[in-house]
Amino acid sequence: MTQGEGIKIHRRSCKNIQLMLQMEPERIVEVSWPADSDAMFLAGVKISGEDRPAMLNDITQAIATFKNTNIRSVHLDSKDTMFEGLVVLHVKDTEHLNVLLEKIRRIKGVTRAERLEQQLQLP
């Protein structure tokens, strides 16, 4: 719990939480996502690799064809022969996200696909 701002949820791996556990453990409240929920969560995926024709199409097809995943936004930028970007999508849970990450990593030319660790700032 934050002072004056309510509750903020952090990942277990967050360095701020590790510090709070040592300094103010009484402010930490365990939470979990409901197992049987139709709720979807936003996740950011950082992707980079070798740019080529149809790369964007291959990435969006890999995402959209798995459990009809909805893509919120895509931003890819290329320079010379390389690209990097961010895809924001709706996922049911971390398993859903992890399968998508593996599908993206298998795309020809993709060298990296990983979950964005910082908080998304979306309108």
Image: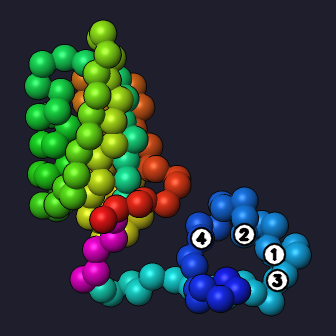
Q: Position of residue 40 (x, y in %)?
A: 28, 74
Question: 119 above or below 34?
Answer: above
Residue on which the image places disc 1: 21
Which stretch did the figure color magenta? Answer: 38-42
Distance from Cα at disc 3 to Cα at disc 2: 9 Å
Q: Earlier in the sequence, mark 1 or mark 4?
A: 4
At 17% across and 33% down in the image, what residue appears? Answer: 56
Q: Which residue is mark 2?
A: 17
Q: Which amino acid, mark 3?
A: Pro
SS under mark 1: helix
- Specify whether residue 41 is painted magenta: yes
Q: Mark 2: which secondary structure?
A: helix
**The disc labelled 2 sits on which kind of residue?**
Ile
Give the percent coordinates (x, y) of residue 97: 35, 57
Q: Which mark is residue 25?
A: 3
Task: Say whether residue 121 is left or right of residue 28.
Answer: left
Main SS category, magenta section: loop
